[in-house]
Every structure is written in structure tokens, then in C-alpha cells.
Image (cartoon, helix red, strand yellow):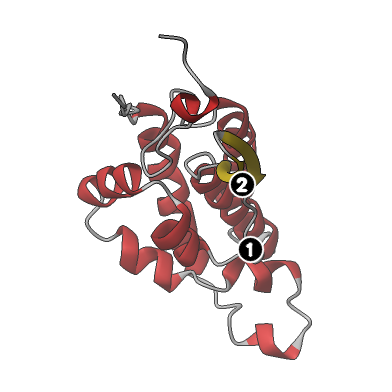
Amino acid sequence: MIPTAKDAVMDFREPSPSMPNRSILGFADTYFEAGKLLYHKEIGHGFYLPAANLLCHSIELYLKSLVNPAKFKTVGDGIYQEVTTNRKGHSLFKMLEQDVVPVFRDQLTAAHSSLDSNMKAIEGLFQASRYPFEEKNKVLVVEGKDKIAFEVAQFLSCAVSELKPMLVHKN
């Protein structure tokens, strides 16, 4: 039997063989390493916000490496078109809860029992570290949140690269 386009559609509730996305993972590692340098230098040097920004950016990229990049919609009988999904915004907790492939999210939260609470604790820090002069962000710029961001980024830097993709075989 010759496979059709319909047979080629993957179940995007589960990861594809290319996940985690190694390209995005490489960028996440780079931002984490840069954030780590500033984080360790931060004490007494005023690098709190740049360190927090780089660490939050690395967290966002680690999570994006685990997000399904595309889905398919039917455009005809047995014809499917790829639809790229790009959610707007930088809510790291929402990304973990809503966008990360469930099997990966479950592995991460099982390996780090306080991941959800840590992600909630740094919610808004990414935006606040980029725009600290805006009135709505001043309350979010609280020293000490960079420590939580560092711990989350450090965990993800190890855990994401060790996740095992689980393939779905459709009959």
C-alpha cells in the first residue's frame, strides 16, 4: 500500500523525533552560559537585571525547544497544510503549562517538584528585566528573583537535553 498525505500526519500531542529541537537548545545553552557569567559577577556590580534577562531568555528557549513547532490543518480530501503556531507573549509559566509537549512537561515536573512554583515566582521577570523603567514593571524587579531564575535555567540546561522523545506509531 502506498502511503498518502493522511498517513504522514503525525499526532502532535506527542513529540516528534526532532524534539527537543536541538537548534533552539543550542541557543538556550548560549544564553544560559552568558547569564551564568553575569549572575556570578552580579554581587556588588549591578548586573542583576542583565543576568535576570539572559537567564529568563534561556528558560524561554529551553521551553520553546519542547514546543510543537507546527500542526496540520485539512485543506482538501487527504491534503494537509502545515500551520506554524507562535503564541505571543513571554509568560514562561503559561508556556510550560500550555505549550510544552505534555510528555516532556510531565518528565520535567516529576524531576523538579517545585518547578511550577518557581516558574510562578519569576513570572513577569523577563519583561521587567527588559523594561524596568516602565511603571508596571517596577514592582516585578525584585532582587532575589534572579536566584530562582538561575536555579530554573540550570535545571533546564541539564534536564531538557536528557529528555527522551517518545514516538507515536499510527497504524
User: Which comes sooner in the sequence, label 2 or label 1?
Assistant: 2
Secondary structure of the residue carrying tag 2 is helix
**Disc 2 residue type (three-letter):** Gly
Please name the residue shown 67% across and 83% down the image. Answer: 137
Q: Which residue is mark 2?
A: 35
Secondary structure of the residue carrying tag 1 is helix
With 109 as the anchor, is 122 left or right in this view? Answer: right
Image spot of residue 24 (x, y percent): 61, 34
Along the line of sight, the residue nearer the viewer: 14 or 90? 14
Dot 2 alpha-carbon crowd within 10 angstroms: few under 14, some 14 to 19, many 20 or more: many
Please name the residue shown 42% across and 72% down the image. Answer: 121
From the viewer's perspective, is residue 28 above or below residue 119? above
**Disc 1 residue type (three-letter):** Tyr
Image spot of residue 65 (x, y percent): 53, 39
The answer to whether residue 147 shows anywhere in this view is: no
- Report which quarter residue 16 is drawn in: top left
Please name the residue shown 73% across and 77% down the image. Answer: 132
Q: Which residue is mark 1?
A: 48
Dot 1 alpha-carbon crowd within 10 angstroms: few under 14, some 14 to 19, many 20 or more: many
With 137 as the anchor, is 162 left or right in this view? Answer: left
With 92 as the anchor, is 164 left or right in this view? Answer: left
